[in-house]
Structure formats: C-alpha cells, structure tokens
Amino acid sequence: MRAAFDPAGAWLAPHDSGAERHGDENHEHDGEHAHNRFRAVFISDLHLGTPGCQARALLAFLKAYPSDTLYLVGDIVDGWQLRRKWYWPQSHNDVVQKLLRRARKGGRVIFVPGNHDEFARTFVGHHFGGIEVMEQAVHTTADGRALWVVHGDYFDGVIQCAKWLAYLGDNLYEFTLKLNRHLNSARARLGLPYWSLSAYLKHKVKKALNYVTDFEHAVAAEARRRGHDGVVCGHIHRAEMRHIDGTLYCNDGDWVESRTALVEHFDGRLELVHWQADEHRPTATPLAMVELGQTA
C-alpha cells in the first residue's frame, strides 16, 4: 500500500476494514523485535516535511519498539513548513509507510493532531489507512491509571493569542536547527557526540524556562480538573516525566532534537527513553520511570 501527502495537507491512503487489520494480526511484527514488545508507545513532534526531522533514527526506533498501541501525539507532519517550501525525502515517506503498515498489520495507531498538522483536525473521527484521528484520547495503563493524551498547543498562549508570533518563532527555530546540523557535522568529524544548540539555548534563557514551567503546570492542572491521573503531551520539545501537585505529567519530547519517546511496559510501568544516534549500535537510554503511581 502506498501513501502520499498532498500540498493541502492530507494523507491519502485507502481505508482498511477491521477484518483486514485483524486478519493480518499474526504477521504484525514480521521483522521487528517482538521479544522487546511494549503495551503502548507515545511519540510526537516528528515534523515530517522539514530537514530537521530525524527520520532514519525514528525508523530504527519504531522497528526496535513494537507495541500494541502507538500514539502519535501531534506535529507528525509539519504543514507550516510544507506550505512555505516543499521538502519530502524518501526517508519521510518511509516513516509514513511504517506507520500505515503497523496499523494495517493489526496494531492500533492513534493520531492526535497538533498545531503544525492542524489540517488533520478536520478529519477527527475518521480512519486513514487504519490510523485513527482523534482530537484527544484517554489511555488507561495496565495498573489502571487514566492518562489524558493531547498535543498541548491549546495551552500555549502564543499559539492561541498571537499566531503570527508563533510563525516567526518557528522560522527562527528552523534557522537554529540548520545551524545545529552544521555544528554537529563538524562535531562528528571530530569524533564528538551529538549536541543540541537549540536545546541549550532554551535551557539558558530564563523566559523560555518560565514558559516551559507555566505550560507544564497548566496541562497538569487541566488533566486533574478532568479527573484524570495524568497527562501525556508534546509540543514544547522537552521530554519530562514527573508529578505536579499529585498529577503525573509526561512529555514524550520530539524527533527533531531529543529523539525521545514514552513507553508503557505490560505491568504498567511508564518509561521515558532517549534513542541514541549511533547507527552501528543504536540503543535507548532510560531517562525516567514511573511505576504504580510513584516516581522512581
């Protein structure tokens, strides 16, 4: 099955019936590491359609981390950048094919659109190639915790009140990422590991730190108000897992800078992992873990 992405911003793929999906279920994990299987995986902010997207690393991660349910927590395709300049290499199409294949072979794939792929919010309630499009979702862990799954852009005052400023910031961010790619090319030639310039700048700027803190508390407070035990979100490209006033806050990070994801084990343990960039021996390093409602 082939999928295409049109300039208007829609995945064009035939609808798979439930019978077809479940009929292929026994072959779902052909070629994947089924022994290293997870109950759920959460990824966001892939930004397919931009040079910053680390598509090859993402493909390796998806192969190594099969799951019963895969949540795509927004900004999967960067419609903002694609409207300005078309960029769609084969590796980005390979990611789309990988996601469609996982849905076609019986795995559940849920897509919660973000602000960069807000075009997909028009299709909430529909399936594309077996991928379910939802405005938001609630994931219940194996140990019974209800996690609200939402991209998080609704809690960004810049996005809601001054979208022109968000577009400006996005252009500046892309420029920083371009510098970052050149910098890391030089570091690689010197045998030095990957280092994120944009992440460093965000950690050093006080206003950026205040913005992150305000965002985290706002999202956690809304999850608590809705009666959920926690929240899983993306948007700010900062992987984090901690309790905020008794509510579990999980941000799965991004695949532009940090190469991070949130995974749930079959006993309900939640783990934040960082995918290493070494193509010869790719590994995932645990960043944080929460088990049975307690921080590790």
Image: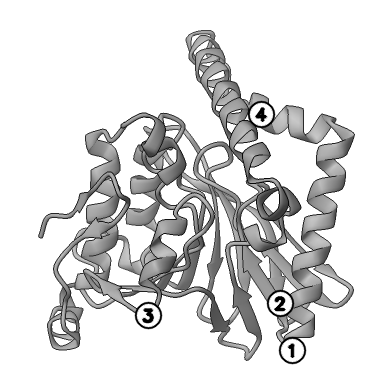
Disc with the residue nearer the chain's start (3 vs 1): 3
288 left or right of 126? right
Q: Name the residue under label 3.
A: 125
- Under circle 3, the secondary element is loop
Residue 162: give x, y in percent of width and height: 70, 46
Left or right of 3? Residue 127 is: right
Q: Mark 4 points at which residue?
A: 198
- In the displayed structure, does residue 238 sit left or right of residue 279? right
Label whose residue precedes the other's in the sequence (3 or 4): 3
Hey, what amino acid is under mark 1?
Answer: Gly
The disc, 2 or 4, on the residue closer to the chain's N-terminal end is: 4
Disc 2, SS: strand
Percent across and percent down for residue 238 are 68, 47
Q: Separation of disc 2 and disc 3 at Cα?
A: 23 Å
Label 2 belongs to which residue? 230
Residue contact at pointers 3 and 4, CB within 8 angstroms:
no
Mark 1 vs mark 2: in front: 1
Q: Which amino acid does label 3 sit on?
A: Gly
Which residue type carries mark 2?
Answer: Gly
